[in-house]
Image (cartoon, rainbow, N blue to C red):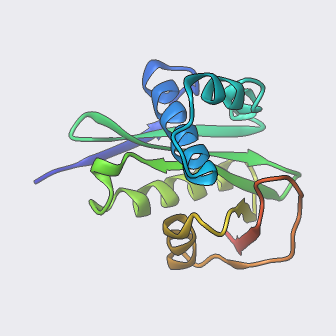
Amino acid sequence: MTTWTLAPEAFDSPDASSLRREYYDEVASRYWKRPATDEEIEQGLDGDGVERLVPPTGQFVVGRYEGRPAACGGVLMLDAERAELTRVYLRPAFRGKGGAGLLMELLETQARRLGARRMVLNTRLDLVEARALYVRHGYGEIPAYCTGPYMEVWYGREL
């Protein structure tokens, strides 16, 4: 039987850094409809606010499949009761193995521990797999709570 293990982890650990880099590479490459360059990936990661994904302002988690780093995600407290889901990523080789649901559950648990009663997120319309994941886990479209160049649809749910 194959197993997933998921736990909070420093956003700058070697495994977390590698996963964050792959996450940015995938979302940027899909947006630009071409492979992102190393320079573009570095620019995207530089100053992206990941340092706030530590208690009490947030939490970063890493998931491992049979001991191999396979998934990551974070929660960021926006205010006393609202957390934002961010940087949710599963390496392609590990998709379809049940990790996404476990990752969502852990991220929601971490948000509750930080005091959140509601989880929100923003994403792009072309990230159809992510949007399907959020809907499967009870997220519904909500009005925009923030703006930015890569934000096209917003979701939320009560925790």
Q: Residue at x 51, y 40 (%)?
A: 35
Q: From the viewer's side, name the closer residue of 82 and 24.
A: 24
Instruction: Spot the residue most to the left.
Output: 1
Q: Position of residue 46 (x, y in %)?
A: 72, 23
Q: Position of residue 119 (x, y in %)?
A: 71, 63
Residue 14: quadrant of the picture: top left
Q: Say whether residue 153 is left or right of residue 9.
A: right
Q: From the viewer's side, name the closer residue of 91 and 140.
A: 91
Q: Residue at x 75, y 64 (%)?
A: 117
Q: Residue at x 81, y 59 (%)?
A: 82
Q: Position of residue 45 (x, y in %)?
A: 67, 28
Q: Residue at x 87, y 69 (%)?
A: 144
Q: How many labels were placed on the picture?
A: 0
Q: Position of residue 81 (x, y in %)?
A: 83, 59
In the image, residue 27 sits, relative to residue 21, either above or below, namely below
Q: Quadrant of the C terminus?
A: bottom right
Q: Quadrant of the N terminus?
A: bottom left
Q: From the viewer's side, name the closer residue of 6 and 44.
A: 44
Q: From the viewer's side, name the closer residue of 23 and 14.
A: 23
Residue 63: quadrant of the picture: top left
Instruction: Spot the residue most to the front.
Output: 34
Q: Say whether residue 148 is left or right of residue 8.
A: right
